[in-house]
Image: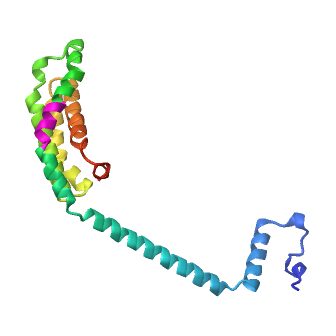
Amino acid sequence: MVDTEALLPQKSQGDMDVNSLKSLSEDWAKTYVKVSFLQSFSEAWAKKYVQTLTEQDRTVKSFFKDKAPAATAAKLLQSLRPASLQAWTKTEALLAHEVVRHQIDSRLIAPWEIAKDASRIYEKALSAYAEQVTPAKLSISISADLGHIRRKCTAVDPRVIGFTSMQFHYMGQLLLEPLPQTKKTH
């Protein structure tokens, strides 16, 4: 039988502080717990954890190396023009009354040019998707084009950007609509 009284500091229990308890627990662990067992257990656990993460990384990488993005991008490129036309119809239906209400000069809204700009950006995005370009690299490659579109749309009346924004929004929705959920998240 172990004499637990010998392990306690000479203070009364009311006088014990956190450091004394910590010291007491460390002394007890050194005496009664095999430290080498704990170290080997924690090392084994850490190795297994790292091994599991490495396997998961390999699985994720092989999933993204799939050739399916090229096929998906090719299908979406085929539906780009109809999606653009439908998107403009929705954009105009949504914002036409705002042109009158806010007295926006309708000559500033060039539907074919807006649709062409949006289509060009989506073509670049789909090409990047097919080549499995990272989102960071894609944003760098299209940032100048998007900046140019923004400057062009807001040069005379900044409110015109709403039509361009909605064209992009609706085109994205229409392009993603027929895809299975698994393709929409990549």
Camera-nearest residue between 77 and 25: 77
87 up-or-down from 39: above or below: above
All told, the count of numbered labels is: 0
Residue at (20%, 54%) from the top-left corner?
129
126 up-or-down from 115: above or below: below
Residue at (87%, 84%) from the top-left corner?
2
Camera-nearest residue between 29 and 157: 29
The image quadrant that residue 15 belongs to is: bottom right
Q: Is residue 161 left or right of residue 10?
A: left
Residue at (15%, 28%) from the top-left corner?
155
- Report the colour scheme: rainbow
* Position of residue 122 measured from the top left corner of the image (x, y, whole percent): 16, 44
* Position of residue 96 measured from the top left corner of the image (x, y, whole percent): 20, 18
Quadrant containing the N terminus is: bottom right
Res 124 visible: no
* Position of residue 24 measured from the top left corner of the image (x, y, whole percent): 79, 75
Res 71 visible: yes
78 up-or-down from 50: above or below: above
58 up-or-down from 147: above or below: below
Camera-nearest residue between 46 and 102: 46
The image quadrant that residue 66 belongs to is: bottom left
* Position of residue 87 measured from the top left corner of the image (x, y, whole percent): 18, 32
Q: Is residue 83 on the magenta stretch?
A: yes
Residue at (86%, 76%) from the top-left corner?
8
The span picked out in magenta is 79-87
Q: Is residue 165 left or right of residue 11?
A: left
Camera-nearest residue between 63 and 124: 63
Q: Main secondary structure of the magenta part?
A: helix
Q: Is residue 63 on the magenta stretch?
A: no
